[in-house]
Amino acid sequence: MASEEASLRALENLMTEFFHDCTTNERKREIEELLNNFAQQIGAWRFCLYFLSSTRNDYVMMYSLTVFENLINKMWLGVPSQDKMEIRSCLPKLLLAHHKTLPYFIRNKLCKVIVDIGRQDWPMFYHDFFTNILQLIQSPVTTPLGLIMLKTTSEELACPREDLSVARKEELRKLLLDQVQTVLGLLTGILETVWDKHSVTAATPPPSPTSGESGDLLSNLLQSPSSAKLLNQPIPILDAESEYICSLALECLAHLFSWIPLSASITPSLLTTIFHFARFGCDIRARKMASVNGSSQNCVLGQERGRLGVLAMSCINELMSKNCVPMEFEEYLLRMFQQTFYLLQKITKDNNAHTVKSRLEELDESYIEKFTDFLRLFVSVHLRRIESYSQFPVVEFLTLLFKYTFHQPTHEGYFSCLDIWTLFLDYLTSKIKSRLGDKEAVLNRYEDALVLLLTEVLNRIQFRYNQAQLEELDDETLDDDQQTEWQRYLRQSLEVVAKVMELLPTHAFSTLFPVLQDNLEVYLGLQQFIVTSGSGPRLNITAENDCRRLHCSLRDLSSLLQAVGRLAEYFIGDVFAARFSDALTVVERLVKVTLYGSQIKLYNIETAVPSVLKPDLIDHSPAHSFTYYLWLLLHCSGRIVNSFDSDTTEAVLPLVFRLLKRNVSSFFFLNDIGIFKTSRPVLLWNVPYSFDERGSSRCAQLVLVWAVRLESSGEVVGRAPSACAPSHLGPSDPHILTTKVIIHQTLSVLEDIVENISGESTKSRQICYQSLQESVQVSLALFPAFIHQSDVTDEMLSFFLTLFRGLRVQMGVPFTEQIIQTFLNMFTREQLAESILHEGSTGCRVVEKFLKILQVVVQEPGQVFKPFLPSIIALCMEQVYPIIAERPSPDVKAELFELLFRTLHHNWRYFFKSTVLASVQRGMAEEQMENQPQFSAIMQAFGQSFLQPDIHLFKQNLFYLETLNTKQKLYHKKIFRSTMLFQFVNVLLQVLVHRSHDLLQEDIGIAVYNMASVDFDGFFTAFLPEFLSSCDGVDANQKNVLGRNFKMDRDLPSFTQNVHRLVNDLRYYRLCNDSLPPGTVKL
């Protein structure tokens, strides 16, 4: 005993020293090593048992429990039976004796250690494990401890970690399922007992003067009068101990519901009891009583009471999240919805004392979040099931949801509710598309609700109606999606507007356009307030109230213009003719505003409050907002264009060229260009312009799109070269070899031109290439001179890559061949090694772009570039691959393997000469194999990539192999089947065993199945025994068990389940064998 006491004192001193602020890291490592060595000793657990019973030092107790945890989870197999019995006996006694005095984290840790023993030994060697838990729950003195043990058991045994065999996991789940009915009965009894006990003492409040308001709706939601009566009972006031017990019971239920199936074990009595406790979350009266009574203890009680509501809603949501609902459980489900919507009505009920918003503000934020989660689950998972029930009033539910949505106290809560409406609108849209015959009936049922929703959402985005809340939104800080809080608010609102527009286009337009018209009138009326002063034009609106109103109107105009733009897609396509009149009305107004904005230039005018109004007149200018939407409309028909062709062009052209000269973002540029790509006005030629390099490239797109309209005049062909050809690059330029800046600028312009024109007509692309041909040839001639300067080479290859993608046909075969041959000659192994190994990221980018060019080449159909295939494959496998194969960096690898995949995918006949007869008479003759060494080398490279840690490369290459198998039957080819198939299967299984790419478990399992399915007999009779015999760390008997457990199923789900079982059990056996003490003899 003296040694135990001495060890305890020494351990306490070590732990105190370890956590002291002055202890150095080196000393901490020494102490850690000493403690680890102590824990590994045989019999160390006896000292730890003494430490637990004799110390009050939290650090010592936690260390002792960690020793037990390590012993049970990693070394239990090698512990003598007598020691196991002693541990199983002592630890529960220790917990029972000290559970009230131990710190909660120590108590919970001790509970988990005992549960870990049950996970290993119940029921064979620890037969009373679960019985003890049930007895603890049934004894009033130890009910909280029993509930903690029950929750821990559910967490650790229902979904255990991988340190158990699959058979043991299945056994534990079955054992727990056998106990579910008993456990749920106990938990129901605890909650009902507490409720009934305190309901007796609860004072019955006088009838509310507004109690009759809910009559009709409540009778719809709750068909049974007794149900309504039960839910209208006053909520009892619980003491602290009762609330603690109830919270533990609800936590247990929530976790149990996460894994047990829906069944008759979940009784109506239990559901009703849970809903009783869900009412605690919306009990404002009890919360106010706690705060009025003043003491901190009462405030804590109020918080705990609200927490009971949160926990009860967690239980309900766990049940709601289950999509698979047995027929016999649907009635319970309907009852749950009825009871929850009673709570929703209670939350959203107006009375003299509380508005809906003030009521929601007083509720616990977590409770509101849980309730919103319930509504989301109801709409997304169960609405289609419940809507068919005549006794469930969906329209009335939408009424409650509407009130709940638009009285949310926080922006996040409002966003979440908008998501629910989006789900509902998606459901409604898909329902109508699947039942077109009932379209009118469905729309008539929901029309009023949808119109009301549209109107309110539009009001919520306008400062005119909602300034206080909108001013709170952050419009500066970007989130992870690169949008501000205001932008997110507006985007989500407009998505709801757009979905309503899809269902009710006429109503939506008639609601939105008058509001837009009102704000446009304000904008158009600003001209009368412009006066000229010495410093220039000035807006003569100075009164603070008038400035504020103008600010709100301009902000609203910006939002409504975006709303009109978001709806543009619903005026085109199949409904273009039907909605032509509405579209023309919008476009005519926008054209008028375009003319107006270009004439008075409000963005240059001085204002009384420049910090507020200037951004409204510049950043939210209609000229920047509606041109894209105007183009969308113009794009559909020439009828609109011809009506205002010259006016629109005269108004917008100066804006476009001013944007070009200012080098604004390509987003606005492309929006404005869309107008001219559609209308192609001839008077563009009369506009003078002068641009820098980037402006020239953008102007080139303007010029080149006129080919269709003016191709007969020759005017375009004559002017396009002068507009497009850069002035910096020419063979006679004496400074070209030394001026990288000029080359960079020139290549940027060239690339921009090609990229902009790549989507145009063949004629336009032909004109573009004629204009650029000399520049392209000079660029190619300069390439060898800069091969050792990776920054310039990077620019050149980027240009040529764009050229190959956009103007490959226009370049012609001879010149394309010249480019490819030049690159192949320049990129020697030495040059590739220099770029990859010595020039860092820039050099790697050069090689990656070169490989991307080759990807375009190998995908080209026909026989033109086939002669390059041997050289390309040799470059990949003999020059690039040896350099990057063993490098840990992912640079270049993804592009190389994509090139190899494209080579195989688009040139399959280069390797396999299939014939029509062979395809028709499959199995009678094998395909003729050519270039076998190259094919084998490529496959070996793919196999080696699966041994590397880069998960992105692994996923990419696995997808490539699966694609080749789907398209070309790769796994069925004789060479793959006979020499590679089971090598790949072996590699993939080893990856699963080592857990190096756990995120891809499902993909790997499917790939293994697809490979094995080519030769199931060979897999089961030859590969599997050979694989098991090569596995180290397991004995012969364990290998036999693994082999027997792998059933000879040939369907995908069963086979992949067997694969994952094999991997799990193999890891488990290795863990068990590693935990045995040295010298253990296994019979």
Image (cartoon, rainbow, N blue to C red):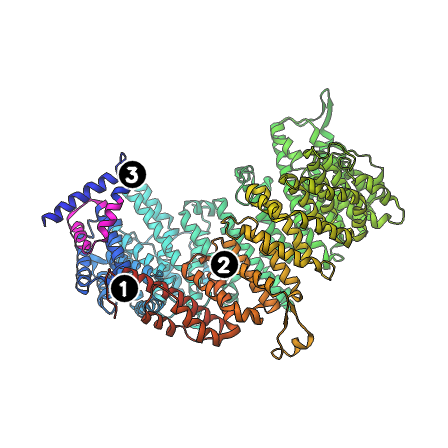
Q: Is residue 454 visible?
A: no
Q: Nearer the viewer, residue 920 or 63?
A: 920
Residue 965: image x %, image y %? 58, 67
Q: What's the amino acid at mark 2?
A: Phe
Q: Are marks 3 and 1 in contact (CB under 8 Å)?
A: no
The numbered mark at residue 120 is: 1
Residue 207: image x %, image y %? 37, 53
- Residue drawn at x 48%, y 44% is 410
Task: Residue under label 2, please give it.
Answer: 946
Q: Nearer the viewer, residue 60 or 30?
A: 30
Whether 176 is among the magenta residues is: no
- Residue drawn at x 41%, y 59% is 994
- Identify the main secondary structure in magenta: helix
Q: Quadrant of residue 256?
A: bottom left
Q: Quadrant of residue 860?
A: bottom right
The numbered mark at residue 26 is: 3
Q: Quadrant of residue 501?
A: bottom right
Q: What's the amino acid at mark 1?
A: Gln
Q: Is residue 97 visible?
A: yes
What residue span does the magenta drawing correspond to?
32-59
Q: What's the amino acid at mark 3?
A: Glu
Query: SS at mark 1?
Result: helix
First in residue order: circle 3 vs circle 1: 3
